[in-house]
Image (spheres, helix red, strand yellow):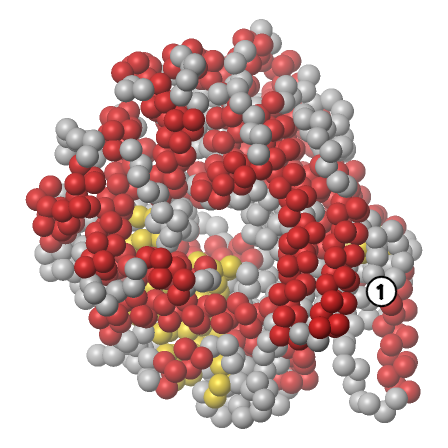
């Protein structure tokens, strides 16, 4: 059963031949995948984030000019909204298609699952307008290069990626004593217009979520004062391109805006940080990446994802110790996970999320989607529209969040459509053997044999309890 | 077996075509014969933390304008001003339906209210809102599910599911021992009957899958029945025109809740969720981001009331969020995570037209941690009262089982019409 566990639980499901390939040395099969960066398994030209973001800025300017020219004030918000959609939509679609193709075809499915795991850990949501076309770039540009590297590098790349900065509103977070705020305050004191119309200050969204969701975890021992202080520390972490006070930087790239940064040393979690500018925030990230609370939080999430909804404490402990001991060297962390005896418990199975279900189906049927519409419609139907977890906590990772009766009916509907589509040329028993190996139950094999059509057999296989779990 | 075997491949379609008469002949009687306790309860969860100081502007508070600045709603009577509730509080101008219901005595507005949670994580905050405890972890079930187990049985001893989550999956508030159903507005048309029968067979040794499939099939029947009923009702809108009338998501979800609750043997309790309230940047005032969301919520609640129709006089709708937001505007024309906020209790069964708020004020010294509206009312007090007065859940069960550790949160009185 070890090959099945390696391929079905740690990977993304079996393509024909995967179970045989992993059978010899299941652990080595996994370990061999987590060396070096994990690029997309398909060679498709995806635009980089700076280009996409610059395109957005240009489209927005263009529309605003048009709007001013036509003086159609009522169309205001809608015009800008449409500009964002038009500039972003092709990129979102291309990213979603490439992601599904990569999941369907990769020969490093464990590494690919880890990419998905971290993309969900560092979640951004495309249902926020400004993130829509950038969501996939965070995964491809910040996560894929570092997934088998050091946690601190992964963390820093993510927190300085324009998609994360924009998603959690840090680009306009301004220190009260920053150059920009001081300058404006002085100007308004000169005029006797009373208070300035716009107040400068921090936005604590990114700082809070880095602590709560990306590193220490919600019970990680920080206070509201630490959140506020950290928010001040990362004032100025922004995106290039803009006007006036926000001019400067390469449009769409991470840009440290010194004039928005709150100057001076700051105390965070009892330690005084005296670094200047951008380095101050990076020093905090480096410290956060080494803390035992972070090790424990990451270990808990990894074990929940790969082993069980209720993470076995022994496995969490082993993974957390590897994290601390190696200074967050991720391959060593993954190795500890693979070496945990709990990982190889054949009964501890996870109910698949819609993503798991779709990707493992593509692999079992040895197909790859050709059009973005297929993928988009599928995930709409199954309730996990790609890159839209809605909240910075990412998609939930326990069965209870996915096991509604209505959700099951949607899976049945999709499985029957898939069956109808891939009806011809598939021998159900062979399909079951290649997709499930020793997990295939005699009852299921009987049901497949008795199915009215081969399409119905495919649907039954996909909806069998053993295929619905990993 | 989850339902009587053998099942012909045309059975479901037959049921839909022949309507309720045929259905009662083939479906366990308990499901359809039930006439029910008369009370209906809908809980609307606003995920992301609604800014109570925008939804229920305390325009009479002397510190309101200086803190909420460009996000503040002006006093009633000014252009784009609040809709007046009393001398201190108003409603956001987007909430015109709620305001109308306030005038009709069907809305209680709570302010300076919060769950017992005092930190500022959305996710822990939502856990506390839904698990009914004083802390985010400690139970895997929700208070509404525990209350469900303690509901008095209906007149004819109903055994079917009495609550529905209007989504594909069940949120924490409704998870637990008592069986509940889930149903999203997204239809699952024409799932092949033969495939369903074979799956039921395949799942017969797996309780977990078996239970879900039979729930799903029963829910589909309920929906089909409801659709048939509204088609038969000459005044009812067609599905297409209903869709056009409820363009936003809250509306579609509310419409589905109403349709299910009105169907024969339909659930008495429904949970609806709406997200998009986490307004850290460019929140807007009388117009803008939050105003648009609030208008969607307001229309959604109207859809619910319209859809429930004759059931409205026996309905109470609780609208709640995980916490409020900062009293002061942040650096990006938005608000950060706070504590005290607002809640609504709406419905024909509600003794409304009142604002319930022990208002601590927005003076610097009155704020919690120098930043948030200080809560003076525990949301569990509201929940307990509604479950007691409206759903007739025994007070002892409420105190011990549904909301353990809630002795500090004493029930209120007279929220529901006698």
Q: Residue at x 82, y 90 (%)?
A: A193
Whole-percent x, y for residue B249 in the image: 45, 59
Whole-percent x, y for residue B367 in the image: 61, 77
**Kind of element beneath mark 1:** loop
Q: Residue at x 18, y 56 (%)?
A: B264
Query: Is any atom of residue B37 visible in this view?
Result: yes
Q: Residue at x 38, y 15 (%)?
A: A428
Whole-percent x, y for residue B241 in the image: 35, 62
Residue where numbered disc 1 is placed: A243
Estimate how packed mark 1 is, as few (under 14), some (14 to 19) or many (20 or more) residues with alpha carbons within 10 Å.
few
Whole-percent x, y for residue B71 in the image: 64, 77
Mark 1 chain: A
Q: Residue at x 60, y 44 (%)?
A: A387
Above or below — where is A205 with respect to A375? below
Q: Pick the residue in front: B44 or B193.
A: B193
Lateral position of residue A309 relative to residue A261, left or right: left
Above or below — where is A291 with respect to A368? below
Pick the quarter of the image with the N terminus of chain B: top left
Farthest residue to the top: give it: A24
Which quarter of the picture shows residue B405?
A: bottom left
């Amino acid at each position: 059963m070890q090959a099945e566990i390696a391929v079905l639980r740690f990977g993304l499901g079996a393509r024909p031949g995967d179970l045989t390939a992993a059978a010899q040395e299941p652990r080595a099969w996994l370990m061999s995948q987590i060396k070096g960066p994990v690029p997309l398994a398909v060679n498709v030209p995806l635009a980089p984030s700076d280009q996409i973001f610059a395109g957005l800025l240009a489209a927005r300017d263009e529309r605003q000019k048009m709007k001013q020219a036509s003086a159609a004030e009522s169309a205001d918000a809608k015009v800008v909204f449409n500009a964002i959609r038009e500039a972003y939509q092709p990129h979102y679609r291309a990213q979603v298609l490439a992601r599904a193709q990569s999941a369907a075809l990769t020969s490093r499915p464990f590494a690919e699952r880890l990419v998905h795991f971290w993309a969900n850990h560092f979640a951004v949501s495309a249902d926020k307008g400004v993130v829509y076309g950038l969501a996939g770039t965070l995964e491809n540009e910040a996560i894929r290069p570092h997934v088998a590297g050091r946690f601190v590098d992964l963390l820093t790349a993510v927190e300085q990626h324009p998609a994360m900065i924009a998603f959690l509103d840090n680009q306009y977070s301004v220190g009260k004593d920053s150059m920009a705020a001081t300058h404006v305050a002085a100007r308004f004191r000169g005029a006797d217009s009373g208070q300035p119309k716009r107040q400068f200050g921090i936005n604590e969204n990114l700082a809070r979520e880095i602590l709560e969701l990306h590193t220490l975890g919600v019970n990680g021992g920080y206070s509201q004062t630490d959140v506020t202080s950290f928010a001040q520390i990362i004032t100025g972490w922004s995106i290039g391109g803009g006007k006036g006070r926000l001019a400067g930087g390469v449009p769409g790239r991470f840009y440290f805006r010194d004039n928005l940064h709150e100057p001076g040393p700051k105390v965070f979690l009892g330690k005084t940080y005296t670094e200047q500018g951008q380095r101050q925030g990076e020093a905090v990230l480096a410290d956060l990446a080494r803390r035992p609370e972070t090790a424990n939080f990451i270990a808990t999430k990894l074990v929940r994802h790969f082993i069980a909804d209720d993470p076995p404490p022994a496995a969490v402990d082993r993974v957390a110790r590897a994290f601390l001991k190696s200074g967050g060297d991720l391959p060593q962390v993954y190795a500890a996970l693979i070496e945990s005896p709990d990982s190889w418990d054949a009964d501890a199975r996870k109910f698949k999320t819609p993503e798991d279900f779709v990707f493992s189906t593509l692999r079992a049927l040895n197909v790859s989607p050709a059009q973005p519409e297929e993928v988009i419609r599928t995930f709409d139907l199954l309730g996990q529209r790609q890159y839209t977890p809605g909240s910075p906590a990412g998609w939930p990772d326990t069965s209870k969040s996915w096991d509604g009766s209505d959700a099951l009916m949607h899976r049945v509907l999709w499985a029957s459509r898939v069956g109808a589509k891939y009806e011809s040329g598939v021998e159900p028993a062979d399909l079951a053997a290649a997709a499930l190996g020793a997990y295939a139950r005699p009852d299921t094999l009987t049901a497949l044999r008795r199915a009215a059509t081969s399409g119905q057999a495919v649907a039954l296989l996909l909806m069998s309890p053993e295929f619905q779990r990993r | 077996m989850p339902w009587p075997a053998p099942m012909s491949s045309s059975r479901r379609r037959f049921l839909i075509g022949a309507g309720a008469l045929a259905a009662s002949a083939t479906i366990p009687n308990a499901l359809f014969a039930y006439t029910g306790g008369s009370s209906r309860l809908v809980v609307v969860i606003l995920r992301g933390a609604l800014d109570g100081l925008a939804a229920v502007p305390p325009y009479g508070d002397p510190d309101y304008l200086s803190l909420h600045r460009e996000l503040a709603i002006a006093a009633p009577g000014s252009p784009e001003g609040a809709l007046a509730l009393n001398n201190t509080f108003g409603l956001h101008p987007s909430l015109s339906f709620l305001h109308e219901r306030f005038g009709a005595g069907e809305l209680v507005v709570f302010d300076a209210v919060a769950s017992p949670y005092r930190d500022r994580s959305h996710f822990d905050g939502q856990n506390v809102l839904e698990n009914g405890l004083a802390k985010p972890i400690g139970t895997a079930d929700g208070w509404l599910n525990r209350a469900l187990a303690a509901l008095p049985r209906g007149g004819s001893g109903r055994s079917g599911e009495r609550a529905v989550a209007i989504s594909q999956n069940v949120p924490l508030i409704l998870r637990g021992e008592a069986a509940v159903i889930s149903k999203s507005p997204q239809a699952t048309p024409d799932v092949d009957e033969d495939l369903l029968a074979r799956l039921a067979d395949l799942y017969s040794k797996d309780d977990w899958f078996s239970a879900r499939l039979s729930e799903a099939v029963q829910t589909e029947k309920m929906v089909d029945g409801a659709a048939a009923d509204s088609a038969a009702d000459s005044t009812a809108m067609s599905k297409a025109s209903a869709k056009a009338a409820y363009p936003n998501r809250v509306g579609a979800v509310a419409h589905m809740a109403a349709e299910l609750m009105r169907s024969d043997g339909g659930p008495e309790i429904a949970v609806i969720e709406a997200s998009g309230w986490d307004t850290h940047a460019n929140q807007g005032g009388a117009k803008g981001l939050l105003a648009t969301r609030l208008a969607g919520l307001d229309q959604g609640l109207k859809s619910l009331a319209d859809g429930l129709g004759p059931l409205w006089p026996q309905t109470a709708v609780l609208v709640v969020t995980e916490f409020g937001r900062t009293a002061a505007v942040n650096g990006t024309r938005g608000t950060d995570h706070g504590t005290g906020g607002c809640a609504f209790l709406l419905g024909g069964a509600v003794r409304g037209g009142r604002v319930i708020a022990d208002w601590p004020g927005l003076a610097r010294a009155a704020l919690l941690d120098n930043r948030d509206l200080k809560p003076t009312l525990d949301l569990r007090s509201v929940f307990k009262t509604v479950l007691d007065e409206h759903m007739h859940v025994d007070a002892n069960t409420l105190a011990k089982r549904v909301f353990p550790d809630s002795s500090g949160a004493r029930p209120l009185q007279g929220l529901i019409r006698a």
